[in-house]
Image (cartoon, grey):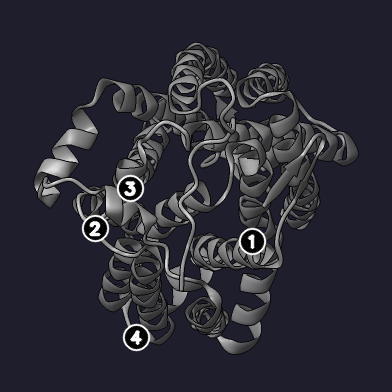
Amino acid sequence: MENTPGKSVFTTYQKAIIAMLAFIQFTVVLDFMVLSPLGAQLLQELHISTAQFGWVVSAYAFSAGISGLLTAGFADRFDRKKLLLFFYTGFVLGTFLCGIAPDYYFLLMARIVTGIFGGVISSISFAIITDLFDWQVRGRVMGVVQTSFAASQVLGIPIGLYLANHFGWHSPFLLIVGLSVAAGIAIFSNMKPITAHLQLKTDRNPLQHLIHTVSKPDYLRGFAATTLLATGGFMLMPFGSAFAIHNLGVTQNELPMIYMVTGVASIILGPLAGKLSDRIGKFRMFCFASLWGMAVTIVYCNLGITPLWALIFLNVLLFAGISARMVSASALMSAVPEPQDRGAFMGVNSSVQQISGGVASVIAGLIVVQAPDGTLQRYPLLGYIVAVAMLITIAMMYVIDRYVSRKQQTDHPAGAPAGVERPQPTR
């Protein structure tokens, strides 16, 4: 890739890599998102309780978190392409099992399998991005890849409901299998081996590699920041629809419209946030987006009955801040690990995100209570807690930004390229 002042040109191969990784992320996130709108149908057809459905949802997150920790020690010992294909194949298998599940226990087992393999895919993708793309353009790459979350939000609920209503609740999972098989074939055929990091591996065995990764102070600061990043997002997410309906006056039929408009806006704003973070600096973008998110969060959580247009506008503002925070934070965090530790660091970081998100959801459930009339109480308190978490995260990311700056000056002294080292793939 050639870098010229004010302009960065991606090669055709690099554009293909970005597209493939974005689509992979889309299928993985869609698999997770599509379960939510199927709740009512699953409760009825499988004759399960709300608590059992909760286990179906959380089984994915917890198995993904545990899997990330267990595989982190091995993540830097293999060609990243082969590692990606292995876990993506397992994810497709787990999703297929969901698509043929005859009862609750089979579905629960299938979600665990899907989580074990699917939960590691994002960390492998981020390691590949770090290997193949210079620091100066990594923000825009992360911005494009992370639009998969917004795209799944736009498509997950409508597609899940439409297919389930017309062809049964198994059909959304089978559609994801079809899309994933096509994506897997594209990776197998077009992605080059990514093996430069193997030349840097040490004599540590997988357990020693994992211990090294989770005990290095610079890495621990990154994991701590990720914990608070996940806490802020996952605290508001579980009760978002209930708050909108019972406190803000949104009807059940209007809810998909809010998700869809917000998702479309996020698809547009995500890449823009990535480009801006490359231009003005990752930490500066993160700081601005966090302050923006804090202000909108506090306003949103203190709302009463609100017109639909105003609510959609506030949701777009809120998710613009959240999207810009995650894109800039991911790009900044990608420069923390050494090349030989990237896979392990990304794996542990993904696990921390999954587990801390689950813990945050539990804490949010203890804070928020539902009144007899259905309204949620103490939601403003939740907003203030999220805002404080965002503020603390700014300070933590400042420390990480200083570390990354010092690391780059050491790796690339005056006269050397400014980007983080980029191992080149070979056939």
Residue at image position (18%, 42%) is: 210
* Residue bearing mark 3: 347
* Residue bearing mark 2: 77
Mark 1: amino acid: Gln
Q: Are marks 3 and 4 in contact (CB under 8 Å)?
A: no
- The front one of 419 and 83 is 419
Query: Which of marks 2 and 4 precedes in the sequence?
Result: 2
Q: Which mark is residue 14?
A: 1
Query: Which of marks 1 and 4 precedes in the sequence?
Result: 1
Residue at image position (79%, 30%) is: 305
Residue at image position (57%, 80%) is: 179
Q: Residues within 10 Å of mark 4 (few under 14, many from 20)?
A: few
What secondary structure is marked by label 3? helix
Instruction: Using the rendered image of the protein, determine whether residue 188 is visible from the camera's viewpoint.
Output: yes
Residue at image position (64%, 39%) is: 139
Q: Reply above or below: 286 against 73.
A: above
Q: Residues within 10 Å of mark 1 (few under 14, many from 20)?
A: some
Query: Which of marks 2 and 1 precedes in the sequence?
Result: 1
Residues at marks 4 and 1, CA–CA distance in whole angstroms = 42 Å
